[in-house]
Amino acid sequence: MDLFHHVSQLKGLISIRLTMASAYGTLFRAPSRCFAKLTSLRHLVLEAPLLRVVSVSPAPEAAVVKLDSLKITTKPHQHIRILENIHFNGLRKLVLEFTRTTSASSLYPTIKSYLKKCSELESCSIAFIPGTPEEDNAGRSVKSKRTLGKQTHADTIAVMQRTTNLKQVIMLNVPPLLRDSTAYVLRCALPCWPQLTTLVFNVHEEPISSNTESEEVLYGPSGLYFLGATIWKSCARLEELEFHFDEAEIAKEKLLDSEVFGHGGCPSSGDDHPLRILTINTTSSRLDLDLRRKIEIATFLDRLFPRLDRLQGSASGVWEEVEMLIGSYQAVKEHVYARIEAL
């Protein structure tokens, strides 16, 4: 208590990195009040892997802190507990790290709660640090659930869609149990992020129990068609994309017959999409695609993203070949354009 009282007198502080090595409990009110008194504070990093904020009754009035950037590393359910004690205003950059195995019941309410209070947010990063299963208030292990009610996902999507200033969204090391639902939430929110330049969504691949319920029935797999139907049409400023795709969809989609292309076999607009870096990840690092299929994918990507200069993915051999095909198309087009200009 004394330490934070003295820190709160340093009115010129603009940045704090605080590592909390104990559970703290009700004592968490001391740092929260300290932050509120530092009117010059703009950047806060809070690392609290063991934090266990205890709810008290009556609940104390939350401290209000205006920041530009915030990074919090703690256990899944503690993210919301922190938000109950501190209201963060004016955030432009948010980083949330989950230090234990995370379930949908903690992830989506956390995203919804933070984004509700961050209407001006420009950068949002969420990372998952593998660890022991999360615990409830009684200290019992909580099994990770694959699904939540449709209303919970709808509420989260609605809040994400209203965060329209986002330029960078990063989700790293997403647990397999959250893969399909997270991809679905992102696909729904993307058309409402017109300023987006970077989207990274990768999965921490590990064996999934055979008795685990599949999410694909609820959310549907992500195929390459998503690149045309959503990325090309709705993300006009996106320059870098990493996403998780379903290998079965990649193998069977009729990409060149899709509605993305007009009767002339070209996108419906002549504007060049700015996407330069594309990473296509799949659960398997091997994709069984014949040459004809690779040519179809290369043609599809080249027509959508004429500025593409790096194609990579978990099935590295396949995407290196497709990248070479795209490079040959680009070289031919450059040669033709040069000849036309010469005439």
Image (cartoon, helix red, strand yellow):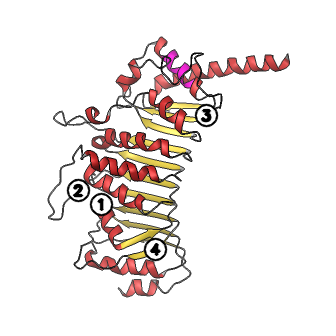
In this figure, which residue is indicated by the disc labeled 4?
65
Spatial CA span between label 3 and label 2: 42 Å
Q: Which type of secondary structure does the marked residue at label 4 adopt?
A: strand
Mark 2: which amino acid? Glu
Question: Residue 18, how many percent across, how many down?
Answer: 42, 71
Spatial CA span between label 1 and label 2: 7 Å
* Residue 134, disc: 2
Looking at the rendering, in which quadrant would you find the C terminus? top right
Left or right position of 158 against 295: left
- Disc 3 versus disc 2: nearer the observer: 3
Q: Nearer the viewer, residue 70 or 319?
A: 70
Asked if labels 2 and 3 touch by Cβ distance under 8 angstroms, the answer is no
Answer with mark 1 or mark 2, whichever residue precedes in sequence.
1
Answer with the quarter of the image where residue 326 lies.
top right
- Disc 3 versus disc 1: nearer the observer: 3
Asked if labels 2 and 1 touch by Cβ distance under 8 angstroms, the answer is yes
Can residue 103 be seen at all in this image of the molecule? no
Spatial CA span between label 3 and label 4: 39 Å
Mark 3: which amino acid? His
Mark 4: which amino acid? Val
Question: Residue 29, how many percent across, how many down?
Answer: 33, 79
* Residue 75, disc: 1
Seen in the picture, residue 310 relative to 144 is either above or below; the reply is above
Q: Is residue 343 magenta?
A: no
Left or right position of 233 against 217: right
Mark 1: which amino acid? Lys
User: Crowding at label 4, few (<14), some or many (≥20) Cα neighbours within 10 Å?
Assistant: many
